[in-house]
Amino acid sequence: MQQYTVCKGDTLERIAASRGLSRAHIINANPWAGEQPYLVPGQIIFLPSSPRRRYVIQAGDNLDRVAAAFHVSETSLLEMNPGLSASYFPEGRVLVLPHAERDRIVYPEGEYGYQHLSHDISLLTQSHPQITAGMIGESVLGKPIPYLRIGEGGRNIHVNASIHANEWITTPCIMRFVEEYACALKEGKRWNGYDPRLWFAQCTLWIVPMVNPDGVELVQEGVQPNNPYYDQLTEWNGGRSDYRHWKANINGVDLGDQFPAHWDEEVQRRGKKSPGPRDYAGTSPLSEPEAAALAAFTVKTSPDAAISLHSQGQEIYWNYRNYEPKESREWSRRLGQASGYRPVKLEGSDAGYKDWFIQEFRRPGFTVEIGLGKNPLPLDDFENVSLETGLVVAELLSL
């Protein structure tokens, strides 16, 4: 049993993932850890030894077959099991299996936060020259809000994610697609039946993967009494110390209600007059730096079509007050056919990014509610939800 002192940014899931454990392993060794919403920097926890996977060699097995089955290299498998070789691999021998090796950069280890995003952007731009990065502005707390660009075609496609803080799983989903797109392009391979060379030649894809970094950090890590926002946030959160339901930015403004598309009517409908976890639209449209930066970046890049990723519901909203062009309905059907999501004609909602984009540009815009369940969606869903996200974007690039 190893003793560990909690650092800023640590969560049960992040600590467990980095050590090949599960959340349950840590809670079993520290029962109190399951009773508080967040770990506090300075707390001491005890970490059990990482359990090793084992496997009994079956009739007909060989080294490369077992290595492939468990996603490990033959070299690491032999290093963990001295005396074995490609020519000596006896049936019935118990193997100790190394941890599975990953061939991707974007892989959530616990909650995928702002630091993970910044790290992955750095690695992706180093590994794939086709991807370039920059920033659209800063959050309330001064975090640079990054964007990615891939492609050189004249058709501009925009995708943004994590407008709502507790919908942060949308960020690694779109980041995974960007990485797989770049890898397929480099290797000259198709991606789920699509040809990324055509995307690259015909389209420029602009991605803002985390619009609300302050809110994401609050949801994932909570807030401690030494934080200057602590008293305000505690009041706005009704005295609760758990922020996993929080959608707004750090000012308690819902960025999903910040855009100048019948904003006054949305304010009246919501009836929220003060900051809180959700639905407070602020003092005016684009009053928050994150929303203002996203709107300005959209105007600058002038997309031909746009997607705003949210969770959850497995639905695609495609219309806004009859401002949408005639092709929007058919495009939503195509996106739904590719992903298995349901196109929905949505009424009675204003001031969202998709609403403003359609009203401002009269071009196809979509809100895509990825996954199904309760926010924040569990990371167990990541592989499925990231594929569905990629299929939506891939189809839009191909239209």
Image (cartoon, grey):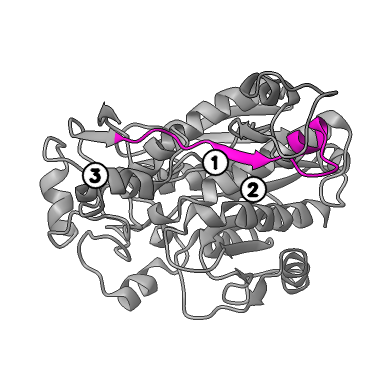
Which amino acid lies under the numbered mark 2 shown in the image of this protein?
A: His
| In the image, residue 136 above or below residue 32 | above
**Circles 3, 1 touching at the beta carbon (< 8 Å):** no
Q: Does the segment drawn in magenta span residue 150?
A: no
| Of pointers 3 and 1, the one earlier in the residue sequence | 3
**In the picture provided, is 48 more to the left or to the right than 203?**
left
At x 87%, y 52%, the residue is 193
| Of pointers 2 and 1, the one earlier in the residue sequence | 2
User: Are there few (<14), some (14-19), or many (20+) residues within 10 Å of tag 2?
Assistant: many
Distance of label 2 from label 1 (alpha carbons): 10 Å
Q: Quadrant of residue 277?
A: bottom left
The foreground one among 229 and 202 is: 229
Element under label 1? helix
Element under label 2? strand
The residue that mark 1 highlights is: 297
Which amino acid lies under the numbered mark 1 shown in the image of this protein?
A: Phe
**In the picture provided, is 144 more to the left or to the right than 222?**
right
**Circles 3, 2 touching at the beta carbon (< 8 Å):** no
Distance of label 3 from label 1 (alpha carbons): 46 Å
The foreground one among 337 and 306 is: 337
Task: Read off the magenta span.
Answer: 47-68
Which amino acid lies under the numbered mark 3 shown in the image of this protein?
A: Asn
Distance of label 3 from label 2 (alpha carbons): 45 Å
User: Are there few (<14), some (14-19), or many (20+) residues within 10 Å of tag 1?
Assistant: some
Q: Which mark is residue 30?
A: 3
Q: Position of residue 132 (x, y in %)?
A: 65, 27
**Circles 2, 1 touching at the beta carbon (< 8 Å):** no
| Of pointers 3 and 2, the one earlier in the residue sequence | 3
